Image (spheres, rainbow, N blue to C red):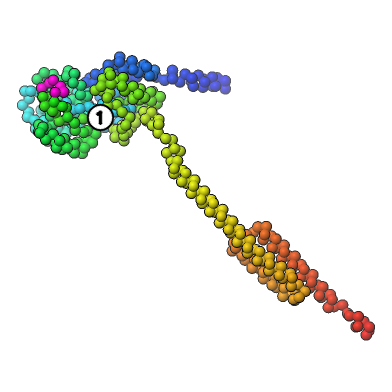
């Protein structure tokens, strides 16, 4: 059994890459043309992953396709609401608002929407829905008072709301008899109008920012002039169950092969960068993408090396100080016990010269003082104190013996007394 486990572990270790799912199902919005063959060629040179383009029902949005795991990758506006099962990989490009109005529409300006206005939001994008909601709020209408077309109905749809990359060569999304419209007709004061929109959008939809479509970008009606509009980042997202190695390889390929991707479509891939703040994204960063982005980040010890050095230095200073304090206290204790030694030795020298009872009383008092200092932590219960107690015991024994000698000599009769008897 153990042999089998070892063999299986060995095979997994050396074939882990082969066991990694290679096929990646991707859903691209209709208004975002992708050259899948060119992308696959770039991917094949740097990883084992393969793209498969998947069509989803027209009534299924990109977020739903991801959360249901009908696809593995999708492009979603950064203004979309948070969904628990969605994880971000990278911001890919800027989606710019293209606002087109039917030429024979008699409803007025976008700020003066009449009830019954018919909208078409390309790809049912979250940014497009947010923008229409702002238009309705400004006009004092709710969603029940207008009509939303799920497909473009040329000649019937009043307003086309498209968020997508600016690709001058691609105008297939704009049918005849529609004109691109600016959010402001006051082109002579474009800077102040941009600031006004920036302030309003940052309050209502923080992820959106003002931008312009320069005059002549598109050869379509309305773009003879500069168009003031808004933009939002488009994110490449996946579901939370995508394997970490797969997300890591995909993130690495997109960033390291940026030049080749730009050759395929500069409008889609020129804005790819790893210099972004994950906190600005609507969805959490996938662990595989985060692992690649933080590959050069210093480790925990490197990040806090200076702080750790400071703590080690302080600990060394504290330890040195405590050691010095302990030595100082030990030296003071020795100095005190030395004084007790001298006093005991002084008592010993006075034996035979002074009354034994007096010396015993003085020795006892000295011993009590020493024990009091020991209790008050002024002396240490170490070898030096044991020497002191031994010295006191020896001097006490000498005094006791001396007292007995004096007592016997006082009781023995002298030679004159015997002669007299």
Q: Quadrant of residue 20?
A: top left
Q: Is residue 33 above or below residue 205?
A: above
Judging depth in this view, the residue of 205 and 391 nearest the camera is 391
Residues shaded magenta: 216-222
Taking the magenta stretch, the answer to whether it contains residue 221 is yes
Residue displayed at 11% across by 18% down: 176
Residue displayed at 24% across by 18% down: 33
Q: Is residue 291 above or below residue 365?
A: above
Density class for disc 1 (Cα within 10 Å; few <14, some 14-19, many ≥20) is: many
Q: Mark 1 points at which residue?
A: 233
Q: Quadrant of the N terminus?
A: top right
Residue displayed at 27% across by 18% down: 264
Estimate the x, y position of residue 140 in percent, counting from the top left.
12, 36
Name the residue furthest top. Answer: 37
Taking the magenta stretch, the answer to whether it contains residue 81 is no
Judging depth in this view, the residue of 306 and 193 nearest the camera is 306
Judging depth in this view, the residue of 333 and 63 nearest the camera is 333
Magenta region's main secondary structure? loop
Estimate the x, y position of residue 314 in percent, counting from the top left.
48, 49
Q: Is residue 64 among what the camera can see?
A: no
Residue displayed at 23% across by 36% down: 206
């Amino acid at each position: 059994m153990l042999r089998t486990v070892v063999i299986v572990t060995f095979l997994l270790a050396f074939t882990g890459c082969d066991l990694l799912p290679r096929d990646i199902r991707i859903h691209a919005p209709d208004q975002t043309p992708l050259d899948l063959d060119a992308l696959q060629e770039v991917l094949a040179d740097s990883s084992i992953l393969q793209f498969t383009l998947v069509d989803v029902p027209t009534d299924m949005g990109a977020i739903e396709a991801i959360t249901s795991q009908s696809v593995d990758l999708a492009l979603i506006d950064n203004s979309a609401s948070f969904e628990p099962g969605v994880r971000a990989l990278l911001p890919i490009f800027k989606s710019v608002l293209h606002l087109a109005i039917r030429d024979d529409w008699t409803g007025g300006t976008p700020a003066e929407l009449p009830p019954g206005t018919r909208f078409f939001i390309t790809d049912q994008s979250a940014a497009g829905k947010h923008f229409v909601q702002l238009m309705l709020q400004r006009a004092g209408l709710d969603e029940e008072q207008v009509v939303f077309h799920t497909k473009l109905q040329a000649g019937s749809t009043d307003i086309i709301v498209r968020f997508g990359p600016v690709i001058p060569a691609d105008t297939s999304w704009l049918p005849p008899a529609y004109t691109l419209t600016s959010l402001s007709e006051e082109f002579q004061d474009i800077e102040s109008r941009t600031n006004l929109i920036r302030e309003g959008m940052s309050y209502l939809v923080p992820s959106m920012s003002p931008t312009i479509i320069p005059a002549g970008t598109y050869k379509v009606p309305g773009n003879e002039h500069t168009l003031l509009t808004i933009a939002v980042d488009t994110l490449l997202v996946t579901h939370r169950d995508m394997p970490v190695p797969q997300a890591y390889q995909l993130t690495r390929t997109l960033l390291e092969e940026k030049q080749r991707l730009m050759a395929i479509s500069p409008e889609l891939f020129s804005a790819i960068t790893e210099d972004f703040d994950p906190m600005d994204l609507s969805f959490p960063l996938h662990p595989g993408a985060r692992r690649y982005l933080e590959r050069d980040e210093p480790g925990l010890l490197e990040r806090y090396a200076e702080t750790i050095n400071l703590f080690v230095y302080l600990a060394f200073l504290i330890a040195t100080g405590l050691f010095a304090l302990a030595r100082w206290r030990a030296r003071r204790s020795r100095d005190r016990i030395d004084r007790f030694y001298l006093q005991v030795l002084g008592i010993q020298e006075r034996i035979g010269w002074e009354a034994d009872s007096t010396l015993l009383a003085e020795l006892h008092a000295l011993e009590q003082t020493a024990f009091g200092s020991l209790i008050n932590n002024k002396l240490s219960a170490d070898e030096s104190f044991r020497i002191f107690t031994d010295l006191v015991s020896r001097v006490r024994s000498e005094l006791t013996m001396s007292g007995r000698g004096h007592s016997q000599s006082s009781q023995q009769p002298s030679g004159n007394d015997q002669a007299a008897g």
